[in-house]
Image: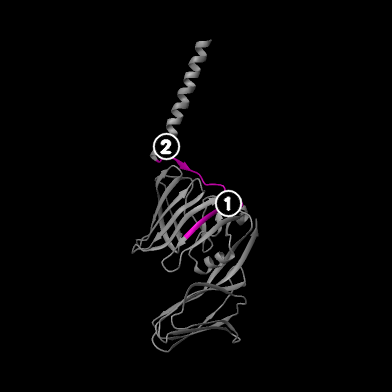
């Protein structure tokens, strides 16, 4: 009887030992399979965002809801209304708003885009559209908590991103265009659970964008644009503007005026010699159908302005 028990225990130990060796081998060789995580309300990720055109910013992305799209998607919001507005007008973060449960897919032009195709496994390959570009993605490595993915476009553009299993979302996401210039770098700084407080998502829509540099002496620019409703969600709550301005020395100056169709001034700014400001964000509370923008330049000047419509949703966690 004791001999039978001894044999059984020996088999049990041997099986456990082999099982442990297999797990270690998979982690080392990259043959692991990574399933999609289940997000909970209050889960959060702190990211830094870098782009060539705008100053770096940091945003805490928070799961505001897990019952969107008939219970098939999460809602990813931002813990700061100012940052939510900034992301709406700059439109450089595709991973806001609805994120599907099955693949953590982001929506572009109303269609869920499978940036990650779970379960993630080395040599997996699939296609998706992001930034209005078609990509072909491949899992290049699975090691420990990290899954490394590369996506290529026909024009030579490239995405390099990594999924962090312990964080349940990207640890990095880098977009380079066909010339090799980085268009966006998104890096994870911290993550956690149980965020409390108000969180926001601002659904944005581009209305106007232009820039002027070294226009010459005493130049006036006049432009008109129309503000129509969001194609699906009706009237905008507000307009959001983002501007950079710089004047050289001497007699350089810039005057900016934005008036609505009733000639009421919605925005007025003046910069004199040596004045500059970057990354200024503001709102215009009452959008109307038509606006006229007038800018006058003298001397060495630079002005850039972006204007977007915004519809704000908020949640209290």
The answer to whether residue 44 is above or below residue 142 is below
User: Residue 217: which quarter of the image?
Assistant: bottom left
User: Residue 131: which quarter of the image?
Assistant: bottom left
Q: Residue at x 44, y 42 (%)?
A: 144
Label 2 SS: helix
The answer to whether residue 187 is above or below residue 306 is above
Q: Magenta span covers which residues?
A: 30-48
In the rendered image, the residue lying farthest to the bottom is 218
Query: Which is the main secondary structure of the residues drawn in magenta?
Result: loop
Which percent across, then down, holds residue 135? 41, 58
Which percent across, then down, holds residue 283? 58, 74
Q: Residue at x 54, y 62 (%)?
A: 110
Which percent across, then down, holds residue 86? 53, 67
> Are there few (<14), some (14-19), or many (20+) residues within 10 Å of tag 1?
some
Disc 2 target residue:
26
Quadrant position of the C terminus in the picture: bottom right
Label count reads 2
First-in-chain label (1 vs 2): 2
> Are there few (<14), some (14-19), or many (20+) residues within 10 Å of tag 2?
some
Label 1 SS: loop
Disc 1 target residue:
43
Asked if residue 307 lies left or right of residue 125, the reply is right
Residue 47: say if magenta: yes
Which percent across, then down, holds residue 286? 62, 77
């Amino acid at each position: 009887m004791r001999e039978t028990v001894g044999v059984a225990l020996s088999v049990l130990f041997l099986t456990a030992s082999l099982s442990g060796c297999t797990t270690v081998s998979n982690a080392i060789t990259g043959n692991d399979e990574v399933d999609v995580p289940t997000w909970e309300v209050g889960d959060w990720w702190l990211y830094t965002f870098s782009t060539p055109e705008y100053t770096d910013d940091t945003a805490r992305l928070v799961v505001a809801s897990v019952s969107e799209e008939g219970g098939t998607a999460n809602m990813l919001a931002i813990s700061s209304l100012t940052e939510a507005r900034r992301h709406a007008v700059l439109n450089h973060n595709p991973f806001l708003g609805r994120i599907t449960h099955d693949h953590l897919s982001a929506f572009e032009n109303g269609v869920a885009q499978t940036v990650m195709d779970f379960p993630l496994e080395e040599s997996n390959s699939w296609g998706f559209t992001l930034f209005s570009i078609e990509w072909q993605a491949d899992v290049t490595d699975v090691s420990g908590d990290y899954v490394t993915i590369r996506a290529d476009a026909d024009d030579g553009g490239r995405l390099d991103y990594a999924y962090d299993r312990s964080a349940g979302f990207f640890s990095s996401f880098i977009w380079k265009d066909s010339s090799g210039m980085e268009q966006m770098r998104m890096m994870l700084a911290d993550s956690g659970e149980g965020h409390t407080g108000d969180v926001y998502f601002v659904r944005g829509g581009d209305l106007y964008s232009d820039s002027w540099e070294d226009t010459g002496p005493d130049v006036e620019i006049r432009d008109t644009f129309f503000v129509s409703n969001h194609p699906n969600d009706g009237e905008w709550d507000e307009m959001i503007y983002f501007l950079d301005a710089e004047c050289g020395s001497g007699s350089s100056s810039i005057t900016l005026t934005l008036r609505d169709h009733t000639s009421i001034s919605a925005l007025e700014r003046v910069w004199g010699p040596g004045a500059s400001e970057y990354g200024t964000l503001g709102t215009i509370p009452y959008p109307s159908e038509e606006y006229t923008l007038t800018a006058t330049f003298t001397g060495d000047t630079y002005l850039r302005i972006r204007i977007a419509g915004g519809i704000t949703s908020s949640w209290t966690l």
